[in-house]
C-alpha cells in the first residue's frame, strides 16, 4: 500500500507537497505521500516568450522592440523555487496568465527606461539599452521566482507612420556611398600616380642596369683576354715540353729503326716478288675505283655548287626582305611616336589654354566683385556723408573736394597751363575819377563816355604789343609815345 504512495519526480520536475505534518510546503525530488497530504508537480524547463514591445522615447517618438525571452524557475536557488511554487504552480508556464504576467513586467520596465532616453541614445547604445532592460526585468521577475536564461532583442523597428530608423538608415547608407565614391576616386588617383611612378622607376632602373651591364661586360672582356693570354702561355709551354719529348722519342726510334731496317731488308727481298704480283692486281682495282670516285666526285661538286648557290641566293633574298620589313617597321614606329607626341603636345596646349582661360575668368570675376564691393562701400560712404551734413549736397561736395585735395590740384593744373608763357600785364588807371568825384549827377553820362575813350588808347597799345596788330585808319593811329599805356585825365 505504501508503495503506491511513493512518488518520484522527473529530471526537470520537483514535487510540491502540502498537507498534514507540513507547516507550509515541501519541495522534494522523491517523497512518500502520506494520508492527508497532497502533491503537485512543477516543471522547471524554461519557456520562450516572444513579444513586440511598443515604447516611446524622450522626444515622444514611438518604436517597437522585438524581443524573445527564455524564462523559467531558477533551479539553483531553492528559495526562488518555493516562490514559484507558491505563486505560479497552479498555472502552466506557457499559459496565458504566466505570459501576460511576464509581458506586463517586460513592457513596463522597457517603457520606463525608454522614456528617460532620447532616440539617438537608444539607437547608438542598443547594447547598453538591452542590458539595462534585462537587469530591470530580472529584478521584477525575482519576486515570482523566475529567471531569464536567455534574452534576444532584435533590431529596433519603426512604428507605422513614424519611419525614424528607416530615414536614419538611409542617411547612413548615403554617407557610406558618398565615402565609398571618395575612396574610389582617391584609390584611382593613387593607382594612376603609382603607375606613373612605377614607369619612371622602371625606366630609371633599366638605365641603371644598362650602365652597370656595360661596366660588367667591359670587366668580363678584360678578364677574358687575361685568361686567354694565360691559356696561350700554358699551351705554348706544354707544346715545348711535348716537342722535347717527341725529339727524345725520335732519337730512340731511330736507333730501333736501324735494327728493324736490317731485318726488314731481308724480308723485303723475300717478299719483293710476291709484292710485285699483288701490287699489279691491286693497281688494277685501284684504277677502277679511282675512275668511279672521280665520276661521283664531279657529280657531287656540280650538285653541291648548284645547291649552295641556290641556298645563298635564297638567304640573300630573305635577308633583303627582312631588312626592308625592319626599315618599314622602324618608319611606322617613328610615325606612330611622332603622332603620339603631337597629340600629347596638343593636349598639353589645350589644357594650358583652358587653365589660362579659367585663371583669366577667375581674375575678371574677382575684379568685378572687387569693383562691386568698392562701389557699394563708396555708396554707403556718400550716404553717410549726406546724412552727416543734413543731406546738404553742396556742403558734402565741398567736403569731398577738400578731403580729396581737389582745389590744390586745380591750382596746380592752372599754374602748369600758363607756365612759360611770360604774359605782359598792362595796368590802366583813371586818375580823374577821384578829382571829379564831387561833380553833379548831370556830368555822370559824360564821365562814362570819357572813361570809355580813356580806355581805348591803352587797349590798342596792349593789342599791338602782344599781337603786332594795328587799329584801322578810321580809328586813328598810335604815336610812338602812345604805344605805352598811360593815364589820361578827362
Image: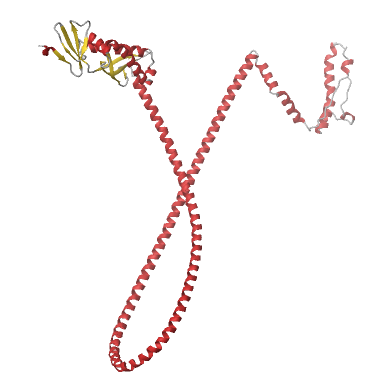
**Which one is nearer the viewer's eye here, 182 or 364?**
182
The image quarter containing residue 42 is top left
- Which image quarter is the C terminus in? top right
Query: How many numbered circles does the render carry?
Result: 0
Q: Position of residue 405 (x, y in %)?
A: 71, 24
Give whichever of 297, 32 is nearer the camera: 32
Left or right, 81 with respect to 439, comes to: left
Query: Where's the N terminus, which quadrant?
Result: top left
Q: Is residue 391 shown to the viewer in this render?
A: no
- Can you give x and y, in whole percent of width and height, for residue 177 in the image? 38, 30
Does 186 sit above or below residue 229? above
Residue at 34% from the left image edge and 22% from the top image edge: 166
In front here: 486 or 369?
369
The image quadrant that residue 76 belongs to is top left
Residue 282 visible at all: yes
Left or right side of 350 for 11: left
Residue at the (49%, 59%) spot, across then down: 217
Coloring scheme of the render? secondary structure
Find residue 412 and report its horizontal and vertical position in percent. 74, 27
Q: Position of residue 248 (x, y in %)?
A: 45, 81
Residue lying furthest front in this view?
Answer: 2
Residue 293 position (above or below residue 449):
below
Give left or right: position of 296 versus 235. left
Reply above or below: 87 against 324: above
* Left or right of residue 173: residue 367: right
Q: Which of 90 and 214 lies nearest the eye of the viewer?
A: 90
Q: Please report the residue visible at 43 percent of the width from the left and 57 percent of the height from the top.
A: 330
Quarter of the figure with residue 116? top left
Amino acid at each position: 500500500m505504501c508503495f503506491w504512495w511513493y512518488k518520484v519526480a522527473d529530471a526537470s520536475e520537483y514535487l510540491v507537497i502540502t498537507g498534514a505534518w507540513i507547516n507550509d510546503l515541501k519541495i522534494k525530488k522523491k517523497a512518500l505521500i502520506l494520508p492527508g497530504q497532497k502533491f503537485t508537480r512543477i516543471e522547471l524547463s524554461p519557456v520562450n516568450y516572444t513579444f513586440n514591445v511598443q515604447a516611446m522615447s524622450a522626444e515622444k517618438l514611438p518604436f517597437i522592440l522585438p524581443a524573445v525571452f527564455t524564462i523559467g524557475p531558477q533551479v539553483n536557488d531553492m528559495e526562488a523555487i518555493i516562490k514559484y511554487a507558491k505563486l505560479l504552480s497552479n498555472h502552466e508556464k506557457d499559459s496565458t496568465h504566466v505570459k501576460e504576467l511576464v509581458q506586463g513586467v517586460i513592457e513596463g520596465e522597457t517603457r520606463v527606461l525608454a522614456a528617460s532616453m532620447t532616440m539617438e541614445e537608444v539607437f547608438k547604445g542598443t547594447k547598453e539599452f538591452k542590458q539595462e532592460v534585462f537587469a530591470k526585468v530580472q529584478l521584477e521577475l525575482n519576486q515570482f521566482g523566475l529567471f531569464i536564461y536567455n534574452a534576444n532583442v532584435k533590431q529596433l523597428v519603426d512604428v507605422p507612420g513614424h519611419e525614424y530608423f528607416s530615414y536614419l538608415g538611409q542617411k547612413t547608407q548615403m554617407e557610406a556611398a558618398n565615402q565609398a565614391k571618395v575612396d574610389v576616386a582617391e584609390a584611382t588617383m593613387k593607382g594612376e600616380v603609382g603607375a606613373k611612378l612605377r614607369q619612371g622607376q622602371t625606366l630609371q632602373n633599366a638605365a641603371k642596369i644598362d650602365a652597370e651591364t656595360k661596366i660588367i661586360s667591359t670587366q668580363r672582356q678584360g678578364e677574358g683576354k687575361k685568361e686567354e693570354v694565360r691559356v696561350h702561355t700554358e699551351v705554348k709551354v706544354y707544346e715545348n715540353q711535348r716537342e722535347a719529348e717527341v725529339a727524345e722519342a725520335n732519337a730512340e726510334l731511330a736507333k730501333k729503326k736501324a735494327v728493324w731496317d736490317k731485318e726488314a731488308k731481308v724480308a723485303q727481298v723475300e717478299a719483293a716478288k710476291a709484292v710485285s704480283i699483288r701490287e699489279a692486281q691491286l693497281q688494277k682495282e685501284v684504277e677502277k675505283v679511282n675512275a668511279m670516285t672521280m665520276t661521283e666526285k664531279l657529280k657531287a661538286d656540280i650538285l653541291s655548287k648548284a645547291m649552295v648557290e641556290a641556298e645563298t641566293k635564297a638567304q640573300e633574298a630573305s635577308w633583303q626582305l627582312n631588312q626592308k620589313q625592319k626599315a618599314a617597321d622602324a618608319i611606322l614606329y617613328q610615325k606612330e611616336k611622332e603622332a603620339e607626341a603631337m597629340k600629347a603636345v596638343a593636349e598639353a596646349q589645350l589644357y594650358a589654354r583652358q587653365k589660362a582661360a579659367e585663371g583669366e575668368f577667375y581674375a575678371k570675376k574677382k575684379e568685378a566683385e572687387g569693383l562691386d564691393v568698392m562701389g557699394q562701400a563708396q555708396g554707403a560712404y556718400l550716404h553717410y556723408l549726406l546724412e552727416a551734413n543734413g543731406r546738404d549736397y553742396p556742403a558734402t561736395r565741398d567736403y569731398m573736394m577738400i578731403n580729396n585735395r581737389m582745389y590744390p590740384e586745380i591750382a596746380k593744373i592752372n599754374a602748369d597751363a600758363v607756365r612759360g608763357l611770360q604774359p605782359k600785364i598792362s595796368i590802366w588807371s583813371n586818375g580823374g575819377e577821384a578829382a571829379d568825384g564831387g561833380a553833379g549827377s548831370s556830368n555822370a553820362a559824360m564821365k562814362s563816355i570819357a572813361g570809355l575813350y580813356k580806355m581805348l588808347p591803352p587797349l590798342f597799345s596792349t593789342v599791338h604789343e602782344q599781337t603786332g596788330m594795328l587799329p584801322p585808319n578810321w580809328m586813328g593811329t598810335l604815336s610812338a609815345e602812345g604805344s605805352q599805356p598811360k593815364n589820361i585825365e578827362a
